Image (tube, rainbow, N blue to C red):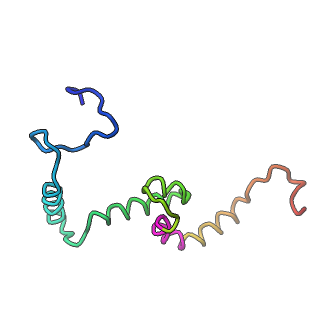
Amino acid sequence: MTATGPAPPSARLFMYHRGRPLQRYHLNAAWSRARKQVDLPDVHWLDLRHAGLTYVAMTGASLREIMERGGHSTVAAAMTYQHLADSRDEAIAASLSDTPPKVRDQGQMGS
């Protein structure tokens, strides 16, 4: 970027060493080498996406936020990453017991 200046949002992040766009072959070869180096032959590209979006869900991100980050157009697609949220029910209940939610007007409770 120092030599060419700021890139437009559509610019490619990685390029072949001669300045040409990377082809699928280059990515697959690099991915294959990386998996072999760390002895994870069964890890796939989409596993990285799934892990990343699951971590986003674990932060407490809303479905809408997960949808935007993952580029999903349906709630059903974003729900795939909520499977770990099922185990958070106990933690949520404990958190609510420890610190009751603040209510703007205490006089309005129970009415």
Look at 13% across and 44% down and name the residue there: 16
The correct choice, above or below, for 16 with respect to 79 in the image is above
Q: Is residue 52 left or right of residue 111?
A: left
Give whichever of 97, 41 is nearer the camera. Answer: 41
Give whichever of 64, 52 is nearer the camera. Answer: 64
Q: Is residue 108 left or right of residue 6?
A: right
Q: Position of residue 111 (x, y in %)?
A: 90, 62
Q: Is residue 92 left or right of residue 8?
A: right
Magenta-colored span: 77-87
| Picture quadrant of residue 9 | top left
Q: Position of residue 34 (x, y in %)?
A: 17, 60
Image quadrant holding the N terminus, namely top left
Give whichever of 86, 17 is nearer the camera. Answer: 17
Q: Position of residue 29 (x, y in %)?
A: 12, 59
Overall secondary structure of the magenta stretch?
helix
Q: Position of residue 42 (x, y in %)?
A: 23, 72
Residue that protrudes farthest toward the left in the picture: 18
100 part of magenta stretch: no
